[in-house]
Each structure stands twice: as structure tokens, then as C-alpha cells.
């Protein structure tokens, strides 16, 4: 298994470590130009503070990486970005980029999305690995099949065994107990679900192909509170008005991926011409390698939520 140690600042760590029951974080990179290919989903990403605090202080499980406008990153993760406000986040990005801060600049940033993060108390911080070079700016990868990577995994395992968070829930399986290096499938959070669905549909509404990001929303086919998961196969990217109509049962998507519009819109609101023009339209499929919506979930929505 691979491990990546990413460098971050103390303010980012301190704010996130102070939050209770946090399920996901955005480990963002201010440049917004480089992609992240060091890990696969479920592998371990660790947080190391900038010098002179040369310690590993926490980590999380890698889920996904995307280049996002800061407005979308904030909408999806809010303070889970490790900033107290969008204004503060913009200020930090500008500082790292060494340019004047702007309250309106929608910077593109690199977003490494991590699930089930953990934060170590100072007494359990892990010294930087012996082979860590002072000139490392972004981070360094390790492999648990090699001595340095195995030692790092062992150090993390020993510390997590002392914390309540050592019983991390992995997907739908039993809680994870740290031991031999193993790939895990952590549960996705709401913010990560939103970004995955947004990217899966090419940042366009699945029905109208609208691409104005502020009005696009990741809809759950089966609501999370009713047993639906934060999974791309349980998601549709919809324009905000269609999302509301979908949740309220005025529209649905059939298992063969066609939009169906209820007669109730006309009966209850004496309107709906624009929506009836969409009736029967085939919706867009997610881009590879994302999977299409689950037909059983679409059937559930049609039978349970849709007003017909």
C-alpha cells in the first residue's frame, strides 16, 4: 500500500483538529495547476506541518482529486477546507500565490478530498521520517513494502490504537482495526459526493446541459436520510429548480434514463410549460470511468417519491 505525506500549515490543522465528528476534509493546494496521482482511493494521506514543526500530526483516506473554483470548494466543504470563512480562504490562497488578495477572484485550486480524517494530540505527533529532505514543499510518497513506508505505517497504527478514532468505519464493512497495511474503502461525505457527481456529469446539468456552476446541485436519488448513500450511482447533477422538483416528486428519471414530468405541476400551479418541454428527454450519462445511475434506485424514486 502507498502512503503520501503532504505538507500543510498549522492554522489549517488547528482549525480542523478543533472540530468534532468531522467526516471529510479538503486538503487544498493553492496553485490549481497540478493533479494528484500519488494515491489510489482508500490509501493513506498524512499531514505534516511546515518547518520548524517537523511532525506528522494526522491524516485521512484518499477519495478523489479535482481542480475546483474556490467558490465550489467552499460550497461543498465550508470550514472543512480548514479556513474559518471564504474570505479567509481567498486571503490564504492569495498569500501562497504571492499576489494581492481579491474578494471576488474565483481561484482554481487543487483539491485532495480525504475521508474519515484523524488528528493527533501533540503528545502523539510523529517525527518526520529520517529521509525527509528540508526542501520538500508539497509532500513525499512512501510504499509500505519498503522499510521507511512500513515504519511510517507502524507509527501511525500505534498512535491510532490509543485514540477512539482507531475504530474507523470502512464503507459498509466492520470498523477498521489498524494492523497490517491494507487498502480501505472509507465512507464518502456529503462534500465529496457533491464534487464526484459534479465531475461525473462534466459540470453540466444531466437534463438541460446547463453549465453555470452556482446553480448546479448534486441530487441524491434516494435521500441519505432514507438509506441512500453518498455514491455516484445514487446521484444526478441537476439545475437547482429541477433538483427541488425531483426531491418533491414532480419529476423523476426512469430506469432507461429519461426525464418524466408529473401532470401535478399543471394541476397545482397552472404552469410548467418549460418543464413539459423536457418530458421524455434522455438525460446525459456520467463520463467514464463513473458508473451510470443505479436502475433500482431510479425505480425506487419513481415508485416512492414521484407524484405521477
Image (spheres, rainbow, N blue to C red):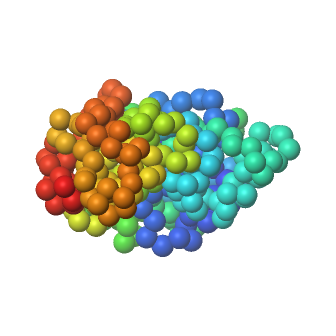
- Please state which of residues 178 and 72 is positioned toward the viewer in this rendering: 72
Q: Is the C terminus in the top left, top right, bottom left or bottom right quadrant?
A: bottom left
Q: Is residue 281 above or below residue 55?
A: above
User: Quarter of the image holding residue 17?
Assistant: bottom right
Answer yes or no: is residue 117 visible.
Answer: yes
Residue at figure coordinates x 40%, y 70% from the top left = 163
- Please state which of residues 95 and 153 is positioned toward the viewer in this rendering: 95
**Where does residue 115 sit, x and y in percent of width and height?**
41, 53
- Tell me how many marks there are: 0
Residue furthest to the front in view is 270
**Where does residue 282 sit, x and y in percent of width and height?**
28, 32
In-image side of 145 versus 305 (left or right): right
- Please state which of residues 95 and 163 is positioned toward the viewer in this rendering: 95
In-image side of 288 versus 29 (left or right): left
Residue at figure coordinates x 35%, y 39% from the top left = 277
Residue at figure coordinates x 57%, y 60% from the top left = 78
Residue at figure coordinates x 69%, y 54% from the top left = 89
In-image side of 64 versus 100 (left or right): left
Answer yes or no: is residue 42 visible.
Answer: no
- Please state which of residues 308 and 63 is positioned toward the viewer in this rendering: 308
**Where does residue 288 sit, x and y in percent of width and height?**
33, 26
Residue furthest to the right in view is 100
Q: Is the N terminus in the top left, top right, bottom left or bottom right quadrant?
A: top left
In-image side of 305 versus 10 (left or right): left
Amino acid at each position: 500500500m502507498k502512503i503520501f505525506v503532504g505538507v500543510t500549515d498549522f492554522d489549517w490543522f488547528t482549525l480542523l483538529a478543533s472540530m468534532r465528528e468531522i467526516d471529510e476534509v479538503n486538503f487544498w493546494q493553492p496553485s490549481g495547476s497540478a493533479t494528484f496521482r500519488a494515491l489510489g482511493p482508500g490509501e493513506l494521506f498524512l499531514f505534516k506541518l511546515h518547518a520548524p514543526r517537523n511532525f506528522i500530526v494526522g491524516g485521512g483516506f484518499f477519495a478523489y482529486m479535482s481542480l475546483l473554483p474556490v467558490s465550489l470548494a467552499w460550497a461543498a466543504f465550508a470550514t472543512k477546507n480548514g479556513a474559518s470563512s471564504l474570505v479567509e480562504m481567498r486571503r490564504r490562497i492569495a498569500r501562497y500565490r504571492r499576489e494581492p488578495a481579491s474578494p471576488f477572484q474565483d481561484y482554481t485550486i487543487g483539491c485532495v478530498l480525504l475521508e474519515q480524517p484523524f488528528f493527533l494530540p501533540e503528545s502523539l505527533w510523529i517525527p518526520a521520517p529520517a529521509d525527509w529532505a528540508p526542501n520538500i514543499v508539497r509532500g513525499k510518497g512512501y510504499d509500505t513494502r519498503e522499510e521507511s513506508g512500513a515504519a511510517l505505517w507502524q507509527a501511525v497504527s500505534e498512535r491510532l490504537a490509543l485514540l477512539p478514532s482507531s475504530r474507523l468505519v470502512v464503507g459498509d464493512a466492520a470498523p477498521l482495526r489498524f494492523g497490517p497495511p491494507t487498502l480501505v474503502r472509507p465512507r464518502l461525505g456529503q462534500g465529496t459526493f457533491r464534487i464526484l457527481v459534479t465531475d461525473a456529469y462534466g459540470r453540466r446539468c444531466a437534463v438541460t446541459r446547463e453549465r453555470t456552476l452556482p446553480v448546479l446541485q448534486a441530487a441524491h436519488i434516494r435521500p441519505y436520510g432514507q438509506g441512500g448513500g453518498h455514491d455516484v450511482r445514487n446521484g444526478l447533477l441537476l439545475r437547482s429548480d429541477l433538483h427541488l422538483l425531483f426531491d418533491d416528486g414532480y419529476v423523476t428519471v426512469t430506469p432507461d434514463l429519461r426525464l418524466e414530468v408529473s401532470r401535478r405541476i399543471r394541476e397545482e400551479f397552472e404552469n410548467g410549460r418549460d418543464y413539459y418541454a423536457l418530458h421524455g428527454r434522455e438525460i446525459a450519462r456520467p463520463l467514464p470511468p463513473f458508473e451510470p445511475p443505479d436502475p433500482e434506485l431510479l425505480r425506487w424514486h419513481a415508485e416512492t417519491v414521484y407524484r405521477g
